[in-house]
Amino acid sequence: MRTGANLEWADSIEISGLLAASSILPENFYARPAIDVAHDLLGKVIVHRRTAGRIVEVEAYLGLDDLAAHASAGITDRTRVLFGPPGRAYVYLIYGMHECLNFVAEPDGSAGCVLIRALEPLCGVTTMRTRRPPARRRRDLCSGPGKLTAAMGITRALNGARITAGNLVVRAPADELRFEMCTSPRIGITRCADWPLRFYIKDNQYVSR
DNA sequence: CAATAGATCATCT
DNA sequence: GATGATCTATTGC
């Protein structure tokens, strides 16, 4: 019989193994067009506070011409980070209660980002469950932008933070799996609703519905 | 199974 | 004052 405490301990061991067998994506990884960064983030691993998940679904948000993107409003207090240097987190509150995690792309001065829409839980599943009691099944833990931030303990306090060092990082696993990528329009938007900027891993059960 | 209502607040008009 | 890169519970077939 394993107790909750034992499971937590096992989770931390899993993370140690993961850290040893992977490398953190450097800032220049993000200093490219948002669409390219979105493609290449699939299969990478997000690590934060004793939890880790494999990215299985993302959306690209572009600059001034993309009316679905926050950056289309130009530089404001909220969007400043999107126009800043790449390799930063952009975290905002949506519908008054959920937080969405994005990674800033494009070179400094050019806006663009990638919304993380779903993760496959890898480490700290017990911790994720305590952070997200409503999730009954493992595949419900991180299968949506608001779900994964809750499960991983990611909040607006991380807005603007570097993701190339520190508590929140993205890693390229040494044993990255092969997969096929699918493309579709982005979810939950009204403007530019037919732009094919959503990308996800084909047949992956952790992709959002 | 699908459709829908309600929760709740930062941001911008 | 309206809107929104969402989630959950509930209703109805």
Image (cartoon, coloured by chain):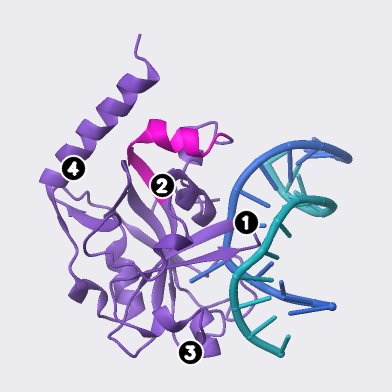
Chain colours: A purple, B cyan, C blue
Looking at the rendering, which quadrant does residue A198 occupy? bottom left
Q: Which residue matches tag 4?
A: A18
Q: Which residue matches tag 3?
A: A75
Within-10-Å neighbours for mark 1: few <14, some 14–19, many 20+? few
Marks 2 and 3, the one that precedes in the sequence: 3
Looking at the rendering, which quadrant does residue A2 occupy? top left
Q: Which residue matches tag 2?
A: A152
Q: Do labels 1 and 4 share a chain?
A: yes
3D distance between C-alphas at marks 1 and 4: 32 Å
Which residue type does callout 1 highlight?
A: Met
3D distance between C-alphas at marks 4 and 2: 16 Å
The local secondary structure at tag 2 comes to helix
3D distance between C-alphas at marks 2 and 3: 29 Å
Marks 1 and 3, the one that precedes in the sequence: 3
Camera-near label (1 vs 4) is: 1
Marks 4 and 3, the one that precedes in the sequence: 4
Q: Are marks 1 and 2 on the same chain?
A: yes
Residue reaching furthest to the top: A1
Chain to which the residue tagged by mark 4 belongs: A
Question: Would residue A100 be visible to someone looking at this image?
Answer: yes
Q: Position of residue C1 (x, y in %)?
A: 84, 78
Q: Which residue matches tag 1?
A: A97
Q: Residue A128 carries which label?
A: none
Chain to which the residue tagged by mark 2 belongs: A
3D distance between C-alphas at marks 1 and 3: 24 Å
Q: Give the range drawn in magenta.
A: A119-133
Looking at the image, residue A125 lies above or below residue A117: above
3D distance between C-alphas at marks 1 and 2: 16 Å
Q: Position of residue A167 (x, y in %)?
A: 28, 54
Within-10-Å neighbours for mark 3: few <14, some 14–19, many 20+? some
Looking at the image, residue A195 lies above or below residue A204: below
Looking at the rendering, which quadrant does residue A23 occupy? bottom left
